[in-house]
Amino acid sequence: MSALRAARSGGPAPSTSPLPPPFSRRALLAGTGLALAAALAGCGSSAAEDRAAPLRIGAIPDQDPEVLQRLHGTLAGSLAAGLDLEVEYRPVTDYAAAVSLFRTGDLDLVWFGGLTGVQARLQTPGAVPIAQRDIDEDFHSVFVVNTATGLAPSDDLGPLAGLRFTYGSETSTSGRLMPAWFLREAGIDPQGFPGGPGFSGSHDATLALVASGTYEAGVLNEQVWSARSEAGDVDPAVVAYTRTPAYHDYHWLLGPRAVERLGEDLPRRLTDWFTGLSPEDDAEVLELFGAQSFIPTEAANYAQIEQIGRDLGLIR
Amino acid sequence: MTTLLDRPVPVAPPLVRDRRRWAWALGALALVGWALAASGLFSGAVLNPGGVAQFGRFASAALRPELAPEFLAVVGESVLVTVAYAVLGGGLAVLLGAAGALAVARTTWGRRRAGRLVVRGVLAVPRGLHEAVWGLLLLNVLGLDPWVGVLAIALPYGAVTATVFAGILDEVPRGGFDALLAAGAGRGTATLYGLLPQATGSLLSYAFYRLECAVRSAVVLGLIGAGGLGYQLSLSFTSLRWEQVWTTVYALAVLCLAAEAAGRAVRRRAADPRAGAGRDPVLAGAVWAVLVLAGWAVWFLALSPATLVSARAREQLGHVLSAAWPPATDRDLLAAVLAAAVDTVLMSVLAIAFAAFGAVALAGLVARPRSAGPVRRIAGGAVRTALLLLRAVPPPVWALVLLFVLLPGVLPGALALGVYTLGVLGRLVGEAVEESDQRPREALRAAGAPPAAAWLYGTVPSLAGPVVALACYRWEVAIRDTVLVGLLGAGGIGVLLSASTASFDWPAVATVLAAIVLLGLAVDLLSERARAALR
């Protein structure tokens, strides 16, 4: 006899709690089954749709990355409209991660720095450079010092050797690779410096750390330095010491899987679209990248960077 | 750790001092002294007064966080992503832990010690690597898939949970289990019906503690690109937009607070079950809530099990493994690893010493008193909020901010970890105080002792055990966390790891990871011994 019937027929009151049991074993199993079904529902979508997958792009600009990441619709929308393609923007914060994702094919078109572009190309056979900005074929880094060092601007890098010194991010071309190269050319051990060099992680952090005096000198991308100087954001305790000779830096790199998927002419169409951007009609996109225009580029432009990367042990 | 706290207090502790304690205490002091000396604290300037203005910018932005509607919308969506990762990662960790516990438990292996040792050694690998490191490795295999974030939390947490669950299973009363075995039941059946029912409370309480921790881990993962609050935080952090950084920190703090409040309610209930038959509505409701949240998170992240077994994942796994094998063994690298390992240990020791000292000093204020005046309540609330913010700001942010006012070296990295750990440890020690026996202190107060003396002689002695246990547990965690703060000239094994990942030198990555795992294992064994001596 069930407890309920017992109670109804005047038997002893059931001794259960007033609340119904919150869940039974059956309910738990049903819930688990439902969750599993929901999980499996998303299954059949991976390989079959590969052919129609959109162009997946990613970019980590050196300057104000948060602005681009939060306005990425501008770039993706503009590119999609211009090429009549489906374009999907995928957020990434880290260059090493972007290189790996380019290799795995999760990213088709990436805005790489000089060094990371070479790393990505070496790991992904068939990748082709698409375009660079006008400023990228004549790119410079700026060595900055704290005014307390009393150093006057000069082309002689020698006095920097005795200072606490910080680079930017480890794989940054303008904040690490090229400055390290020019330091070595000047006879200074790029890994020397008292206590070893620091890696601030970003150009803005380099500026802040040199301003605080924790590091007496540092090096950063000239584009960021100019932008911050013009906006009056640079602490007066930081002054430019010298700038490096020119080198090639950022560029758009396209992976081979996208070409297989979207047609042999994709590289050409992309290059045409980028180089066709004009300050009048596409001011928004160009502004996101801090450029006046985009120009074509080729792998040979980065041969020097590859050589230096190998010399400094950043490319294996 | 929680196992230790949940363990029933021995009825009549021997009133004899264990001589081994002296050796351990002296050893610990010597280690802290060495770490302090190596940090350069006694041998020259460590402060950089010129950076006060930069530090001030960070601190003052706390009062005026970014509140623009567009940014708040971004943060709101990121909160959802973080919750989804935390629930799935933490939930999967509990499942993995439950399965793993059976493989590690002494109960399973009986007298076959070798097998148990092997399983423990295997578990040391997932456990010894930080969630962010797992994230980086998984990203190379699975690409941009939500599984990366989920597994990066679930694997290390699962291994830790397995060890703790096994400890719980091994320590519940075994009468029912033995009786079932004697009656001819198999080991599995006996465990299910003889051990599990008695262990449920402790298991549930630890499972919810893990879910709480998963929230903070989900944020750290965002730093490597898994999305959510950590992703927004890292974007704003790159350009030093402190107002935006603080908005994300506050969002995270609220999230942590909610998770901790819910976790504490569950743990209280589990520790003190209600009398009477029937299920506890609070516990059942909590379990249901987690299940519903997990179902939502699977849908929200579009998680698909097919990715895990896809041909691409296998191909990429093969690529990474063949690139990393054999691990690099050149003399230079090994020497560098050894030197960095010493730095890492010193850094973590400094961090824990700082955090433990601070936690004990603040414990009296952190614990919620049963009766107190308004001033004491306000002070307690302020300290608890401060601790919440200390652990809501991720270690890499602390590392940069402290580097403004300290000169480069081991100290800023150690302090960054210490400040963060203080946030975690302060809360745990405060809870230990709340749970501790209040009678000695009350007796002293009644006898006329001033509050400070009553605290010193009535409460502190009973805290020694839990505090040492908690500090040992966080020491292990701090070893893994040093990989997060190594970069900024602070040194330690994190520098080697990021240098080798930046140059895609996979053999060196393998060597460094092996070193980190071994270091974690060594610290684990050492702290286990230390805790045994204190018992």
Image (cartoon, coloured by chain):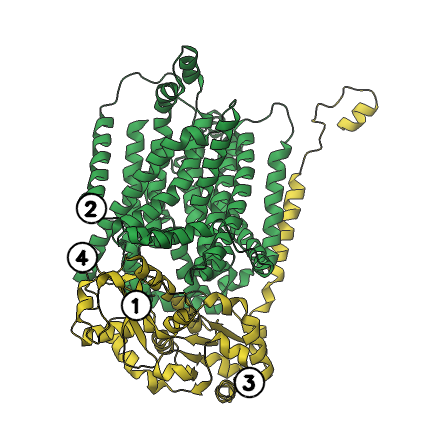
- Percent x, y of residue A31: 65, 47
Q: Residue at x 39, y 45 (%)?
A: B420
Query: Which numbered tag is attached to residue A239?
Result: 1
Residue A156 visible in the picture? yes
Q: Look at label 2 and name its amino acid.
A: Ala
Q: What type is the residue that disc 1 sits on?
A: Val
Image marks 3 and 4: residues in contact by CB distance under 8 Å:
no
Q: Is residue B125 above or below residue A136?
A: above
**Residue matched to label 3:** A280
The residue singled out by tag 4 in the image is B335
User: Chain B takes which shade in the image?
Assistant: green
Location of residue B244 in the rendering, given as x and y in whole percent from the top left corner = 49, 57
> Element at badge 2?
helix
Discs 3, 2: same chain: no
| Pointer 1 local density, CA inside 10 Å: few below 14, some 14–19, many at least 20 | many
Q: CA distance from mark 2 to mark 4?
A: 19 Å
